[in-house]
């Protein structure tokens, strides 16, 4: 055997025997059952898809998009361009069968089975919605070596743990374009979410074109709203992808926008309503909980709402309508003698009873359009029909035990979903969300009660995001939460999740999700189009201020403030910070010189970073606000380097002083995410 | 004076006396008149805008968007959020006055005047459309030092040289989303273009929803089309920004999509029309010139077209309708005895006469909707009404002198515009376009003839682009061409243009133009989400194959092929290549050691780049196709380094052989743009 043949043999063997391991799979959410077999299906350009069975046309869009994404990733020129009918390619390598037409909603059979062998891939599902899930799994299964792409031989059978797997997007605080909605729908599908809760109305804006109530958009949208055609278009787009859209019109609180257009149904007391009500309300520009509230004692309120529902409901074919109901503090009710008299007359002891009266009035208005009501937990009262879904949201931030209302609702016979723990606008680590199960371990529930817990919903409130950075707040963390909603609790594994999440996060780019690219774009603007590597380095150890600490009092930022600042480029789970903090832990445990050397490398990098930022700032005013932070870190890094190098006696009080400056949260609305690591280093110096 | 005060004095002085120079201004297109004065207007958060005069509401959208872009760039928290009425802020620092309502079209007064003094900025314009131009100029004027943003004191008075300043986007070959259209409209406004020519129909697809001709989208769009609401939405969006939209339905050639839906009006000869015509046409997937052509002898053709125009025209309020008319080779006409007989009967000697008959039949159909006709140069014939605009496109690539038909049309009394020289899909250098004036210097024209030359139009044909990289083909080169259309020919200056273009290119990001960010995204996919710096380095010296050489025969790529390849990330005017080639010229002239050292640095960088790419390719099959090129460059670089270091006798034949491999155009659909520099180095070695 000559040398060349020997090499070929080695390549051949390594190719044949390289076996995919379960750890190599970047599936998210992790499937219910998976059996890995030997061998693989090698992808070639003659790859084709064939569909059989009874299907909804969405399967053709879905499989055609699947082919396009597969060729985009692999650069392969597939012969098959479009799939438009069943049984077009009987000999195709990918055979898909669906037993019946799927319909979008939360009670559909979403299960699927994939079998991959060396020469064939088979997808079987009850409905085309299961098929769409299978195609996403297949895309996540794609592997490669240096020259080829392949799928590992395996069998997967999969189905969701929870039936309501939602993402809420608030388009009232900051309007989000049609494009933002569509690309996020695609990303939802990629991680098997199935409900898009569209928060369309709040104090800061009304976002729905109403042909019979033009004042709402004319006076309360700043020109930023969806036309009815756009709404239908988005609903159709979502339906084609198996996503149910649940619209929300938040009442009776959060009503500043509605009342800007229709002040006559507001609760604010004025002596002569005709004279003064018109000037009582203006669209809200700040963030927070505001007093404007609909007047539950005024018959005109119900007339208007009924007319609104009559026009809005037909735009949304789904079964559920979200009526909000949260955070009505009742201040204007308490201050209004007319409402007080109404309360007395009806024998309502509390504002909650009054709000329940209001909520119950909405039930028939929505029933008329075959809608079941879903509302935030404040709508719960004994008279609500049992089909109502209670949306549990309060938790420690609101002074309640997490998910208390979820358990209460389930016990009282209501269906319910959980959002507490999934408030991604709070910029917490993905770990915090991932380790927060929907049903608390300690909860004691009967099977019936458990069954009433339909699932969970991620909430993206938009006080501090624009279309340019909303993706970086939703993703990738929502993918990990989606696993909590879909997968068996036994599959929940933090370390494995973080590795898979990185893969899933990258692949979201092919769906147009801009979390990676727009971060760099914001930094380019900050640097005034100079080199951004130092800003990137800083952003990789900084995280935006968390849990309502960024926008103090809700008045630092208006809705029209710039969100092109350093904090807007930063994200939670800053990558270098995670690495550094883990490195410090490892070093302190094992004391290996190579780990110390990596720590030193970080410290030197941060010293250079600061001097580079100072240099860049000469031509970039937007860098100025981060300099005190990079200066503090540079100072501390220098001292730590000295300490490590034994060049100077350790001055703990100086180190602590320098550390305190780094650990301050008064820097450009970010916090330094390496502080835990830095603190441990200082504590362990002696 | 102590040292600290001395420093403060220096800073103060440098601040006071630093005077903006004309070279610092990054205006594009360059204004007609500009006088720079001493001093500057310092931007502060109390900055406000006030509008007076007679205005169209587009001015409120325009000024509000202006504020948002200004705060995005500067990070300033302006107090003023929205501008909704005239005279809202009489004491505002920016005073805008418009004399009358502007209307979108090519005959509007677009002139404006800006005066900036240290405490006030004044914009005066005849119409709000002039005001929009002024706001874009103002944004380009923004300067900064290390801590502040300011506008230099100056007076600008400006107006366009040509009245038709167009960009054509082909959405037939590759459909482009609403978002792509909108962001490109914004970018057009930024460089003062005023006509968006929307190429909506071609062999590869019909993109307009017709309620009375549903077959067109059902059979000939692959589901990719604009609803009528979306079209109206885009037209409204354009109108708000002062942009005229000119729709194109290309007939009688380029008609495969129309004939896929309505084969009965095709020219293909079949003995028994009823039996066979239905199967004659299928939507085209390749690129090129195809035979399917409407039948000019069939009355049904005109009936159908008339009905189509009746539904399409009302969607577009503008005065012009583009009917295509190009590249009808008449093959099916020649082969069809019925059409031959018709030709004979009507005494038409040539197919051009037959096409003229066809074209003249369209005139009244469009006149009915108050539309003037514009068409590609082939529509020119002596009977066309003089209001017709002849769209000159042929040039050396088609065997004609550049702009021949432009001069002919002007001389024959037609209005005319030029696209030859502005085919940006050909991936040529911006220099080639920028140095190609609309009216050739040698043309001898009377004033009347010259006046008939309305302007120019950039054409973005979309055979080889998708929504993900179309921006990188249109921009930034179109900004330089826009200068050719707007500015005085005396302002045309290659060196100055290139510097200003870089600035304008960067700032297009704030309008959503994705040319910078999507390049990196494509490279991330190619690298399989490993480090992309070596791929970026390679892409900065490579350019996609030019002038119809990439997609040989039009059949290498189908419309559904992947456009996520290395060539799709590369652009014309590769940045490092320009730098390297200039560096070589400089070194060969001046022989400075520091320039040789920079050349050596490049060579070393390319040697490392190749070894890094080999390493990355172990986990990235999509890198494989570029390795032969990086290998060849690495080999040549090594030999050149040896040669410079005198370590080896120079082997010219080896160098030439290695160079030939670099200079081959058989590498991953790109060419190495440093070849001219490399060749000069080799030639000068001895």
Image (cartoon, coloured by chain):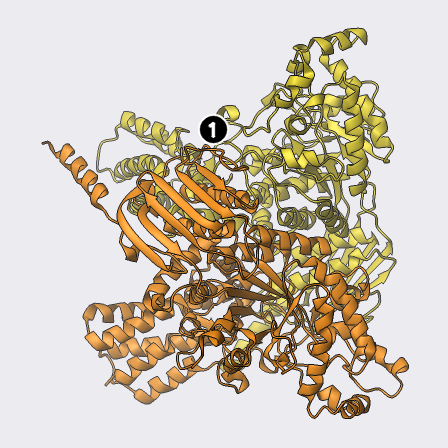
Chain colours: A yellow, B orange
Q: Percent position (x, y) of residue A354?
A: 76, 15
- Residue A361, by quadrant, is top right
Q: Nearer the viewer, residue A662 or B486?
A: B486
Q: Percent position (x, y) of residue B485?
A: 45, 66
Q: Is residue A670 visible?
A: yes
- Residue A577, by quadrant, is top left
Image position of B344 (left or right of B11): right
Q: How many marks?
A: 1
- B649 to A388, vertically: above or below: below
Q: Percent position (x, y) of residue B299?
A: 82, 78
Q: Nearer the viewer, residue A657 or B406?
A: B406
> In the image as oriented, which residue stretches furthest toward the left?
B1
For disc 1, the marked residue is A556
- Residue A81, by quadrant, is bottom right
- B173 to B117, vertically: above or below: below
Q: Nearer the viewer, residue B458 or A128?
A: B458
Q: Percent position (x, y) of residue B205?
A: 70, 69
- B495 to B134, vertically: above or below: below
Disc 1: host chain = A
Q: Is residue A444 visible?
A: no
Residue depicted at x 76% and y 10%: A343
Badge 1 density bin: few <14, some 14–19, many ≥20, Cα 10 Å: few
Image position of B615 (left or right of B588): right
- Element type where label 1 sits in the image: loop
Image position of B170 (left or right of B192): right
Viewport quadrant of the C terminus of chain A = top left
Viewport quadrant of the N terminus of chain A = bottom right
């Amino acid at each position: 055997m000559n040398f060349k043949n020997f090499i070929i043999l080695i390549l051949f063997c390594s190719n044949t025997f390289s076996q995919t391991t379960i750890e190599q799979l970047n599936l998210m959410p992790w499937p219910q059952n998976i059996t890995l077999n030997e061998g693989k299906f090698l992808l070639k350009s003659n790859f084709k898809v064939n569909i059989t069975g009874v299907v909804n046309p969405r399967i053709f869009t879905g499989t055609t998009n699947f082919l396009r994404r597969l060729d985009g990733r692999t650069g392969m020129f597939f012969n098959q361009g479009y799939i438009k009918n069943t049984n077009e390619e009987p000999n195709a390598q990918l055979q898909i069968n669906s037993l019946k037409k799927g319909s979008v909603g939360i009670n559909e059979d979403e299960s699927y089975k994939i079998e991959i062998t060396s020469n064939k891939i088979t997808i079987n599902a009850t409905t085309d919605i299961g098929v769409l899930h299978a195609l996403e799994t297949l895309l996540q299964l794609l592997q490669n070596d240096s020259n080829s792409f392949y799928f590992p031989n395996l069998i997967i059978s999969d189905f969701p743990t929870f039936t309501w797997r939602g993402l809420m997007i608030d388009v009232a605080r900051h309007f989000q374009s049609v494009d933002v909605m569509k690309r996020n729908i695609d990303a939802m599908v990629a991680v098997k979410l199935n409900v898009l809760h569209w928060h369309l109305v709040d104090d800061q804006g009304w976002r729905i074109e109403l042909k019979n109530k033009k004042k709402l958009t004319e006076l309360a949208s700043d020109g930023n709203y969806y036309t009815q055609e756009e709404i239908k278009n988005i609903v159709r787009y979502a339906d084609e992808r198996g996503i149910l859209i649940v619209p929300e019109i938040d009442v009776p609180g959060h009503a500043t926008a509605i009342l800007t257009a229709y002040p006559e149904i507001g609760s604010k007391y004025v002596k002569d309503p005709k004279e003064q009500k018109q000037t009582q309300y203006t669209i809200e520009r700040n963030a927070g909980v505001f007093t404007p509230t609909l007047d539950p004692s005024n018959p005109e309120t119900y007339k208007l709402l009924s007319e609104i529902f009559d026009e809005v409901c037909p735009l949304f074919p789904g079964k559920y309508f979200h009526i909000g109901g949260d955070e009505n503090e009742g201040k204007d009710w308490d201050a209004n003698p007319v409402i007080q008299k109404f309360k007395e007359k009806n024998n309502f002891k509390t504002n909650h009873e009054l709000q329940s009266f209001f909520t119950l009035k909405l039930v028939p208005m929505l029933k008329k359009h075959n809608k079941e009501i879903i509302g935030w937990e404040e709508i719960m009262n004994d008279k609500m029909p049992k089909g109502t879904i209670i949306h549990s949201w309060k938790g420690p931030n609101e002074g309640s035990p997490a998910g208390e209302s979820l358990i209460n609702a389930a016990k009282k016979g209501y269906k319910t979903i959980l959002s507490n723990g999934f408030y991604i606008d709070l910029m917490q680590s993905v770990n915090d969300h991932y380790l927060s199960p929907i049903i608390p371990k300690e909860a004691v529930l009967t099977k019936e009660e458990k069954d009433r817990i339909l699932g969970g919903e991620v909430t993206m409130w938009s006080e501090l995001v624009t279309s340019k950075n909303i993706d970086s707040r939703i993703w990738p963390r929502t993918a990990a939460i989606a696993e909590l909603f879909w997968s068996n609790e036994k599959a929940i594994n933090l370390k494995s999740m973080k590795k898979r999440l990185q893969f899933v996060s990258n692949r979201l780019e092919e769906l147009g999700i801009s979390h990676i690219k727009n971060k760099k774009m914001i930094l380019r603007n900050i640097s005034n189009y100079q080199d951004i590597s130092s800003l990137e380095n800083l952003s990789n150890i900084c995280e935006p201020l968390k849990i309502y600490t960024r926008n103090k009092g809700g008045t630092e930022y208006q809705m029209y403030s710039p969100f092109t600042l350093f904090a807007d480029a930063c994200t939670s789970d800053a990558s270098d910070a995670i690495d550094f903090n883990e490195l410090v832990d490892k070093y302190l445990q094992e004391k290996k010189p190579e780990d110390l050397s990596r720590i030193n490398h970080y410290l030197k990098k941060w010293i250079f970073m600061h001097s580079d930022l100072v240099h860049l700032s000469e031509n970039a005013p937007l860098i100025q606000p981060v300099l005190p932070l990079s200066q503090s870190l540079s100072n501390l890094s220098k001292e730590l380097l000295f300490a490590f190098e034994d060049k100077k006696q350790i001055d703990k009080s100086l180190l602590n002083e320098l550390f305190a400056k780094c650990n301050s949260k008064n820097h450009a609305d970010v916090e330094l995410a390496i502080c835990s690591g830095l603190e441990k280093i200082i504590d362990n110096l002696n």
